[in-house]
Image (tube, helix red, strand yellow):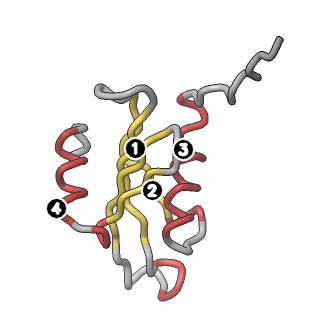
Amino acid sequence: MLAAAPGEALPTMADVTALATAAVRRRIDVPPSAVHILSAKSSERMPGFVVCGRVDINSHLAGEGDRHGERFFVVVPGDFAILDQDGKALVDTYWSANHCE
């Protein structure tokens, strides 16, 4: 008899910050301290969590006076990360649909 092995455990809220930070860092080469989570909560539309935040792209390069905050949206589980560079209107849509304001 063949049986499927159980899959990975679903992430919990305690895992969300690290998973979202990793998803953003796969898209943009920044230190973890540059990723700022503004909102993390259970998704109303799908299993898992949604995360909204900003990443300070230049803060680690040019000092505190030269910051450029790029918004992001991440779905956990998974590594689905959308950034302003993918389209501000797209991020606006996800932020609005998930009450990230």
Evaluate if marks 4 and 3 touch, with contact meaning CB atoms under 8 Å apart. Answer: no
Q: Amino acid at mark 3?
A: Thr
Q: Residue furthest front?
A: 1
Q: Is residue 22 left or right of residue 59?
A: right
Image x and y of residue 8, in percent: 69, 30
Q: Residues within 10 Å of mark 1 (few under 14, many from 20)?
A: many
Which residue was labeled with disc 4?
Answer: 89
Picture coordinates of residue 41 (x, y %)? 39, 31
Left or right: residue 5 compared with residue 33: right
Cα gap from disc 4 to disc 3, whole angstroms: 24 Å
Tell which tag, 2 or 4, sits nearer the viewer: 4
Q: Which residue is mark 2?
A: 36
Q: Which mark is residue 17?
A: 3
Q: Quick check: marks 1 and 2 in contact, CB under 8 Å?
A: no
Looking at the image, tell me whether mark 4 or mark 3 is earlier in sequence order.
Answer: 3
Find the residue positioned furthest to the top: 1
Contact, mark 4 vs mark 1 (Cβ under 8 Å): no
- Report the residue at 37% width, 53% height from top: 53
Give the mark nearer the N terminus: 3 vs 1: 3
Residue on which disc 1 sits: 51
Instruction: Count residues near mark 2 (Cα–Cα under 10 Å), then give few for <14, some for 14-19, many for 20+.
Output: some
Identify the element where label 4 is drawn: helix
Image point (73%, 21%), residue name: 4
Q: State the CA–CA distance, disc 2 to disc 4.
A: 20 Å
What amino acid is found at the position of numbered circle 1 in the picture? Val
Could you give the CA–CA distance between mark 1 and mark 2, rounded to whole angstroms? Answer: 10 Å
Q: Nearer the viewer, residue 4 or 13?
A: 4
The reply to whether the C-beta atoms of the residues labelled 3 and 1 are less than 8 Å apart is yes
Task: Please tell me whether mark 2 sits on a helix, a strand or a loop.
Answer: strand
User: Separation of disc 2 and disc 3 at Cα?
Assistant: 9 Å
Amino acid under label 2?
His
**Residue at 36% in and 52% down:** 73
